[in-house]
């Protein structure tokens, strides 16, 4: 119920802000849009080179500014505020595209999923070997290699010294190696 009342009061505040701005500017939101949209569209087109995207930016900029109209100190500053919003939208769009492209390039370079996934038999053998270790060695190995924690944090968790952690990890890895190699010899 509180959310509903909050949403209603926000709508009333925005609507009141629009009404106040329209009364003070004399031509209302429609007039404001008609007066500023062509210049804003031109600016957005020059920034993006895409007319459809430019129109989307203008619509988004006006949508963002609707709630801010009542807070403008100088009504003549609307044009500058609109331009700044469009430039920011453009910068955010191209930054997002750059990140997406970099991700796609990284994914294209990385080996396929079949090279990442070990076969089920190897995974099960590793799990069985890990479960065969004493609890402290298993905890040290899991914290070191799975959680990728530094030795001093593992020492705090296990309540021992960092040298003990190194010893636990070394002995555990040796036991895993022997156990896995022993399984390979049996096949």
Image (cartoon, helix red, strand yellow):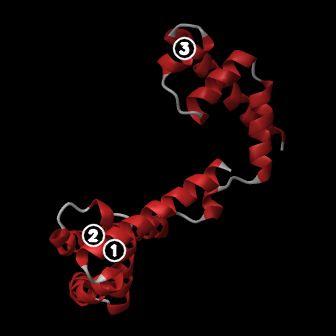
Q: Would you place residue 48 above or below residue 122 in this image?
A: below
Q: Nearer the viewer, residue 172 or 141?
A: 141
Q: Are marks 1 and 2 in contact (CB under 8 Å)?
A: yes
| Horizontal arrangement in the rendering, residue 31 relative to residue 162 (left or right) | left
* Residue 61: assigned label: 1
Looking at marks 3 and 2 on the same chain, the residue that comes earlier in the sequence is marked by: 2
Q: Residue at x 37, y 71 (%)?
A: 18
* Residue 155: assigned label: 3
Q: Could you tell me how far apart the alpha carbons at marks 1 and 2 are, in whole angstroms?
A: 6 Å
Query: Could you classify mark 2 by the number of other residues whose Cα lies within 10 Å: few (under 14), some (14-19), or many (20 or more)?
Result: many
Q: What is the x, y in percent for residue 134?
A: 75, 17
Looking at marks 1 and 2 on the same chain, the residue that comes earlier in the sequence is marked by: 1
| Horizontal arrangement in the rendering, residue 29 relative to residue 178 (left or right) | left
Q: Residue at x 31, y 63 (%)?
A: 70
Q: Residue at x 70, y 29 (%)?
A: 176
Q: Check disc 3 and report its element: helix, strand or loop.
A: helix
* Residue 85: assigned label: 2
Q: Check disc 1 and report its element: helix, strand or loop.
A: helix
Q: What is the x, y in percent for residue 90?
A: 29, 74
Q: Could you tell me how far apart the alpha carbons at marks 3 and 1 are, in whole angstroms?
A: 53 Å
């Amino acid at each position: 119920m509180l959310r509903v009342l909050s949403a209603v009061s926000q709508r009333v505040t925005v609507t009141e802000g629009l009404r106040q701005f329209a009364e003070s500017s004399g031509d209302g939101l429609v007039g404001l849009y008609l007066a500023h949209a062509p210049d804003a569209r031109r600016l957005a087109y020059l920034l993006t080179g895409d007319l459809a995207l430019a129109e989307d930016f203008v619509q988004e900029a006006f949508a963002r500014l609707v709630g801010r109209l009542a807070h403008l100190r100088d009504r003549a500053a609307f044009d500058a505020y609109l331009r700044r919003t469009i430039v920011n939208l453009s910068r955010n769009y191209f930054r997002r595209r750059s990140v997406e492209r970099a991700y796609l390039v990284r994914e294209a370079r990385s080996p396929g999923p079949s090279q990442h996934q070990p076969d089920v038999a190897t995974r099960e053998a590793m799990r069985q070997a890990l479960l065969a270790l004493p609890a402290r060695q298993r905890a040290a190995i899991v914290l070191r290699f799975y959680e990728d924690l530094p030795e001093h944090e593992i020492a705090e968790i296990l309540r021992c010294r960092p040298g003990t952690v190194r010893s636990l990890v070394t002995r555990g890895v040796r036991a895993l190696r022997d156990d896995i190699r022993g399984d390979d010899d049996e096949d």
